[in-house]
Image: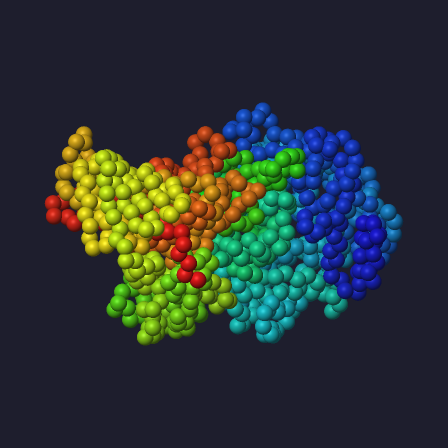
Amino acid sequence: MNLKTRILSVFLLASSTFICAQQTHKIMLSGPDFEHPKTWDFKVSEGNNSGKWSTIEVPSHWELQGFGEYTYGRWYKELEQDEPSKEEGFYKLDFEMPASAEGQVVSIHFGGVMTDTEVKINGEVVGPKHHGGFYEFEYDITEFLNFGDDNLLEVHVWKHSENNTVNNAERKADWWLFGGIYRPVWLEVKPQTHIDHIAVDAQMDGSLKAVLDLVNPSENLKVLASLSPLEGNETFEVKTIDLTAENEQTIATQWSKVKPWDPEHPNLYTLKLELQKNGKTVHEVSERIGFRTLDFRKRDGIYLNGTKLVMKGINRHSFWPEGGRSTSKRISVMDVNLIKDMNMNAVRFHYPPDDHFLAVCDSLGLLVLDELAGWQNPYDTETGEQLIKEMVDRDVNHPSVIIWDQGNEGGWNYDLDDDFERHDPQNRIVIHPWSDFNGWDTHHYPTYLTGVHRFGSGENVFFPTEFMHGTYDNGIGAGLKDFWEHYSESPLFAGGFMWVYSDEAVLRTDWTGEEKFDSKGNLASDGVLGPHREKEGSFYTVKEVWAPVQFQPKAITETFDGSFLVTNAYLFSNLNTVTMNYRVMEAGAGTMYNPNTKARVVASGAIDLPNAAPGETRKITMPVAADFFKGDWLEITARDQYGREIYTWTWAIHKADYFADKLIYQEAVKKSAKATQDENLVTLKSDKVTLKLNAQTGYITEVKSEKRNIPFVNGPKPIGMKAEVEKVTLTQEGKNAVCRIDYNGGIDHITWTMYPDGRVHMKMIALKNAGRNSGFDGAFYEGDIDKFGITFDFPEEGVEGITLFGRGPYHTWRNRLQGIEYGIWEKEYNTTITGESFENLVYPEFKGFYANFLAGNLQAGKNSFKVFSESDKLFLRLFTPDEAQNGFRGSHFQPSFPPGNISFMYEIPGQRAFKPLSQQGPSSQPSNIRIKSGDDGISMKLWFDFRTDVDLK
């Protein structure tokens, strides 16, 4: 069955109901989305596959279908191009209209076309050319149709607008520029007298005002308004309201006992309006609505249903790698769920998103800032007026939409600000994102101390509509906790929106070879998620920092009584709507010797949560059974009233020395280990392991385990301090061979102990003696310390993975210590470059820093070995992540790493975001220390197991 036949069959099935039901009949000419398209005839003027008629899937962008030329919107700046691509597309579709539709009103609707559009029916232009690529528009085509006969639809699309302000607003921007009919196309068939549009203002008290646009009204008209919940079986009285013969009129009514809409309780209703004349229904429409009251109080806050809002938001592009801006409801559902999974409650766009995305925001509960496009440049007044009408008319009834944005970062036209209220009976506020405008301060990318009579030091309500820039995942989570806690100190703080949701790496249909996805270097790799929604490390940081349940700091010790202090950080929900469960987990003694060994659940159960209103803190208590301390770590998981995981928190039950003693295999051996020195070479030897140290540098020069040499050498080198060997002392302590190396400088001494069974213990004491800097010019440790510890060389080649006990599974930074939890993490080796290696994004990344390191089995074939920490709060540095190669000048992938490959550290660097670390919060700043006489010094204790034949299965 061809497309024309399919469309005709739809009309024939519907034609019998055109007259009797008097509903608006929607007939799809395209598919509903790019994943379910229909085929049209197509030709493109320039670029790939140009100059010849073929076919194309609709909706889609023609670049993704192999036509035309790709262009990124920074063509005028970093890309240094003279102009963007400007091809034109020509579409054709044959369809039939049944004779039974004659006498009714038929309109054609386009969900979105980039960028200028001219429409013909049967060779005649049906209306003025439409300008603007992000907006839904329509034409009345009744007079152009052949009813009961063939019809030809022709659509001429210009990728580059003839209106230069449209190009400046939409196509001179920091995003991909596409062409084509990328949102659905459909017909609507309505009776001659009908309700053309409704704009609703539904308040939390059940009152409703609706502005009706009527076509061909007459005397003796009434409207019957009925209400039904999307969930539940409540019934509501049908309201009858008399109308006049005017084209635009406002109706008002009220229902009792409606449930208000908010992002934590997204209660929705279907409003049905039946237009009647002399008691007979002539037309009916339905609209999905939510009852909620917005109150914008300058110098106070933004209130929803009487509750002051704090928006935990993110910016999102409508984007999918294989579809460009042509998406689907499936993607919208996935994205809203992922946003909710990060404990966010708000989202912002640079243009009106897909209608199905807003529908999902309504049903799952997200606050939306809906934006008229204008990326640093505005539309002219005439064009802007038309586009505002199209945007507001489409989106006005979505309860999720709470604010209108006009342009972005200078892309506003002051003459257009009052246009929004002409179409919006709710009179939502209009903001200018990044400016302090009309009482609403939305400054972009503030520093930690931004505030010369602004933000916390100002008078206006503030909510940065962009902050925590996420290029290469280096800003979304890093520093977030500092910023959020600092801003939250002000009662004028209304939240913020991070940049951005996902990397915009598009499939290049014009590329051959292994590389398939293009983010234009660092320009579009800003997401907390990868292009196919791969979860980067900051995803979990945000999830913890913005969790609506917050645990006060707590360390588990031998006196632990099961109690915690918990704060309800919800806006609308009681703490007792949350379910909470705990698990006490135990790692087997042989876990580090047998990868993929599952931890055992020692105990589990539910935790009762008390009545606590938003903002209140309460004590909660979990049972502490007699075998609690057999466990190694505690997990507590909270879920919201819908079963969505809020977060899983963990606590170590014991200290590092307990775990080292438990997890390292100890073998009874009769023969003693020996220590010898031959000039500058110290040898510590047991039956199974030989360790050699350079007596002049203190570095390991060789590790031998039976017949294999393990290339763990050239350390311990000091990081963040200077040290030189002063003397070497060998002793025998029972069966243990001991080498103590005393240093001048930052390291006081390191003691190496070889045990008879081959275990090797290292104990370092550093920063012990005030002013001791023998032989050094100046200080022997750095004043600002962002890296401190010791490092070794070890080849990355041949590494297969690691069994890691500590906080993971993602790597971390000094200013991104949230979102990582205790566990036994099995990590396979990968070379993921966040924001670049889109063809093979494997998460969590393998290389980087890991917090609270307790034990690890580094699997590297014959070079494998294990290491255990007796020191708490130790970081493991596991190689150096590969840097992005395609970033433009000025991009920052990661801070510098210390020398070597395997490091053990007490201080690691912070990750900068859009601005340097000096402009971020306290956790991003380097540490410092002053050494005083009598200090014990800083201790670091490690066990190394280089043995090859240990098998604890």
> Which residue is pictured at 42% across the width and 54% down the height?
803
In this view, the residue farthest toward the left is: 933
Direction from residue 868 to residue 98 in the image, left or right:
right
Direction from residue 440 to residue 239 in the image, left or right:
right
Coordinates of residue 466 in the picture (x, y in percent): 45, 44
Coordinates of residue 785 in the picture (x, y in percent): 27, 40
> Which residue is pictured at 15% across the width and 43% down the height?
769
Residue 397 in view, yes or no: no
> Which residue is pictured at 34% across the width and 43% down the height?
703
Determine whether 294 is above or below 85 in the image.
below
- The image quadrant of residue 787 is top left
Q: Quadrant of the C terminus?
A: bottom left
Coordinates of residue 415 in the picture (x, y in percent): 53, 39
Direction from residue 531 to residue 222 in the image, left or right:
right
Determine whether 432 is above or below 267 in the image.
above
- The image quadrant of residue 662 is bottom left
Closer to the camera in the image, 222 or 927: 927
Residue 841 in view, yes or no: yes
Closer to the camera in the image, 450 or 393: 450
Closer to the camera in the image, 798 or 617: 798
> Which residue is pictured at 39% across the width and 56% down the height?
950
In this view, the residue farthest toward the front is: 671
Coordinates of residue 477 in the picture (x, y in percent): 41, 48
Question: How many numbered badges does the structure rendering display?
Answer: 0
